[in-house]
Amino acid sequence: MRIFHFSEEPYPDAWGAERPSLRITLPNELCDPDVAHNLYHRYIDEWMLADELGFDIMLNEHHSTATCLTASASVILAILARVTKRARLLILGVPVGNRPDPIRVAEEMSMIDVISKGRLEFGMIKGVPYDIEPANSNAVTLMPRFWEAHDLIVKAMTTTSGPFSFEGDFFHYRNVNIWPRPYQQPRPPIWVSTATPTNAVEIGARGHVMASFMGGMAETVKLHKAYAQGYREGGHGTQVPVDRFAYLAMCGVASDEAEGRRRCDLIADYLRTNAQVADPFNKPPGYFSVEAAMRSARSPNPRAFRTLMTPKGRPVELSTASLDDFIECGIAFAGTPDQVFDQICAFTDGIGGLGNLLLMTQGGHLGAADTTDSMRLFAREVMPRLRERLAQRQFFEAA
Amino acid sequence: MGEEAVAFDIGGTPAIAQIYGQGRDILYLSAGLWFADESAFIQRLARNGRVIVPIAPGFGAAPADRRWNHVDDLAYLYLDLIDRMKLSELVLVGASFGGWVAAEMAIKSCAAFSSITLIDPLGVKIGDRFTRDIADLFGLPDAELRARAYVDPSVFEADVKKISDDELARRMRAREGLARYGWTPFMHDPKLLSRLRRITVPTQFIWGAHDQIASPDYGRAYASHVPGAVFTQIADAAHVPQVERPQATLDAILSFADAHR
């Protein structure tokens, strides 16, 4: 059982409900380089603390946005590869369908794996809709490009006998021969995130770790079942080990319930600002199927790129949702250590087991003192019993 | 839907066309814009000839095909369609994105055409590298696109509650289809401008005077690369004069076609 500390390295001073968009169109004159400097150092310190406390480490990246200063997760990961000692280093991930040069990705990931002495967990992601524009990648062909990049990167990382050539639909190289090769042999574990059963089947067929983000219990079970189908069809076995699954939620802890809830409520502004994207960058053509785009156009809130449902089927509007809405949906765990432990157990039991818990323990305006206190408390009072509890289930069991 | 539909298997891809009316053959390449409904104009055109409207893979009822992702693919597909249908002395008309495809066809072969009319066509790069020639169709809110595309945006029904599922699907597929063929380089082929010299039949550019998707200046520069091309401006229209000023557009097409039989 692994528990990861995650932050998007937000720059919340530039947030504001009055801003039409926090992404793509927000001018970077609102970014004070001194403030950004201090934030980077602070967030790196928090990852180093995570390393000491027994958390593993997760990073992601977004572009052209005040919600996430990690414009290149590889850059931060390279630093962490040097300054941390034991934590697994999860990049979740590299948007390989948006990157023009997959071999560069293979090189960077191999370097990080070697520098960290084999601690890389290598995630490849499709990327969110509003990261299409900064990359100027064509969403219509995103998934075939993603899988082609994936196949090429895996081949580059696992070929040790000298150059090979590649002539695909999207990428061309005459001589691929990366140095260094990865520390972990034949390659680091690969993770892929998704929100759709179609992709989950494909990920399962490859046997990679599948991560899903804040989908709630019903959606997560659906994805895990789809993965299990692909896993069986891919010949990996009839039972799926729970370490093939990862789930991301927000988490705030304090000795006092109200304080733990306050902390998580601040983190939850991450989700509340999710739809604060200049129209139409949250719906690039081709990113969603025509059927999904039609459903969305006819929905009560056509600007939202995703809708969230409580287990009782009540739709939750992300931009105005309360902390209790998020807790009810299983995408936030908040309160005292006992409460958080119970909430997480109820969720992981409900989805039939989980091997990797990804926790957004910092988000939005949650400051360094509150973040580190919450992390320490979690590590001391929740982590040991949670590890013990979650280790009881080895294989995914659909309800 | 057309009065008749034809489908040919061309190299494993179905070339689909709707056919309307009778008389001299007019090949009409639709604008393909999700914020323009050209069906009434096509009916009007069909009162003056047999109008053949090919449907690009990924648009309308034509299934997307992973191998079809470049305007050249469409140009060759439609040239094949012309061969299969044994068409000649065609009046070629293309609007906006369809105008781009028409130009890509004409630089390959003008053998089947008697004249060409392009209505606010996209497809070439005129300005410098920091200047956007064509409004960012995928980066502007729909309301702004309509304001740029029409003098009177109310001619287009923007309220999705008031349109059928079929029309909504057409719009969604058009938006995806345009990205499939025109995402990058954005709505142009860097090679096209220097190849326009190969167009050897009489060619007319029709341009809405108030077009803010692609300006009349862009249109004049575009036309200047086609040998002998005529530039006709349509008053009180913007990017889709065939929708906003259908009669004036029709008159311009027909009089040019009649003069170049």
Image: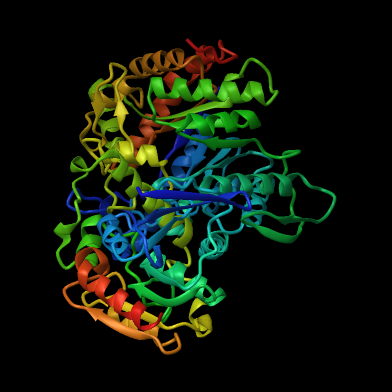
Quadrant placement of the N terminus of chain A: top right
For the residue pair A282 and A67, the one nearer the viewer reads as: A282
The number of discs equals 0
Which of these two is toward me, B197 or A260?
B197
Q: Is residue A256 above or below residue A317?
A: above
Taking the image as shown, residue A42 lies to the left or right of residue A394, namely left
Task: Return the x and y of residue B244 as percentages of the image width and height.
Answer: 20, 65
Q: Report which quarter residue B127 is drawn in.
A: bottom left
Residue lying furthest right: A161
Q: Quadrant of residue B53?
A: bottom left
Q: Residue at x 50, y 75 (%)?
A: B106
- Most distant residue in the front direction: B23
Q: Residue B40, located in which quarter of the rendered image?
A: bottom left
Specify whether A62 is left or right of A116. left
In this view, A17 is above or below A309 = below
Q: Is residue A5 visible?
A: yes
Q: Residue at x 53, y 81 (%)?
A: B195
Residue at horizontal 45 percent and vertical 88 percent from the top: B227
Point out the residue furthest to the bottom here.
B228
Q: Position of residue A315 (x, y in %)?
A: 25, 26
Q: Is residue A387 above or below residue A269?
A: above
- Can you give x and y, in whole percent of width and height, for residue A136 in the image? 45, 59
Residue ID at (68%, 40%): A118
Q: Nearer the viewer, residue A225 or A17?
A: A225
Image spot of residue A231 (x, y percent): 63, 24
Residue A285 seen in the current view: no
Colour setup of the view: rainbow
